Image (cartoon, rainbow, N blue to C red):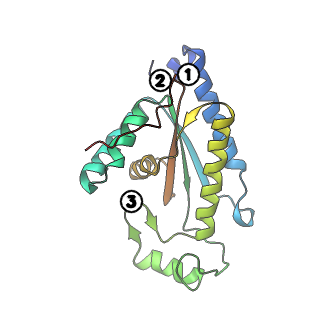
Amino acid sequence: MKINTLQDILIMDPEQDAMMLIASLMAVSARTAPKGKGVDTIVTRIIFGDEMERVADVMIEIGNRTGLSPFPRDAQNLRDSTVCVLIGCKGTEDLGLNCGGCGFLSCKDMREKIATDPVNSLFNGPNCVIRMADLGIALGSAAKTAQMHNADNRILFTAGVAALSLNMLPGCTCAYGIPLSATGKNIFFDRRLIP
């Protein structure tokens, strides 16, 4: 049974109900993951039903436009999943450390690049390297939570790209999706690229 409305959540079977609960726990894990200088720029959102279908449709469009075959393959994984946790980061919010990790000598130089000539591709940039590390830690924390509860999952950059193009995570420059599934065989492995 696909979840499309809040009413569907109330009549789910126990495994689907568990997937929604685990998705909520994953969002908590992402929120409480360590952040650079203790400043939180992580944004989470749980999607299911029609929203997941919209993201999957955009993943296919992006795959067709770019010729990147992981997009349609991952779109099918998304469609076969119960729920998806989106985790994004406001990567242009620098820490003022002037570490150079973003490729610029100072945070001010990075901000000037963003203001005058930003990179607008699958993700937008440049991004603060510390913020990108925060995003990676949040993703790892969320995936760990799914694993601890035996929910099959996979971190998909493709789902994050599509979610950003749909403005599902306002203010974010980089995002990933983590779909969840509970079936007899993990749907996220033994995957073939769709030509």
Question: In the depicted view, which residue is nearer to us: 185 or 157?
Answer: 185
Measure how far apart labels 1 and 3 are at the Cα level: 31 Å
From the image, tell me which residue sits under label 2. 3
The earlier-in-sequence mark between 1 and 3 is 1
179 and 191: which is toward the camera: 191
Please determine whether, in this image, residue 24 is positioned above or below residue 62: above
**x and y percentages locating residue 193 in the rendered image:** 33, 44
State the CA–CA distance, disc 2 to disc 3: 28 Å
Badge 2 or badge 3: first in the primary sequence: 2
- What element does badge 3 sit on? loop
Check the picture and name the quadrant holding the N terminus: top left
Mark carried by residue 122: 3
33 horizontally vs 120: left or right: right
Q: Amino acid at mark 1?
A: Gln
Label 1 crowd (10 A; few <14 / some 14-19 / many >=20): many
Q: Which mark is residue 54?
A: none
| Residue at x-position 58% and y-position 51% | 43
Q: Amino acid at mark 3?
A: Leu
Task: Give the class, few, some or many, for how many residues have Cα within 10 Å of label 3's Cα (few <14, many ≥20).
Answer: some
Question: Can residue 170 be seen at all in this image of the molecule?
Answer: no
- Labelled pair 2, 1 in contact (Cβ < 8 Å): yes
| Residue drawn at the location 57% of the way across and 82% of the way down | 108
Residue sitting at the far front: 190
Indicate the secondary structure of the residue bearing disc 1. helix
Label 2 element class: loop
Residue 99, visible in the rendered structure:
yes
Q: Which residue is mark 1?
A: 16
Question: Image height check: is 126 above or below 35?
Answer: below
Quarter of the image with the C terminus in it? top left
- Measured as percent of width and height from the top left, residue 71 is found at 35, 47
Label 2: how many residues lie within 10 Å, few (<14), some (14-19) or many (20+)?
many
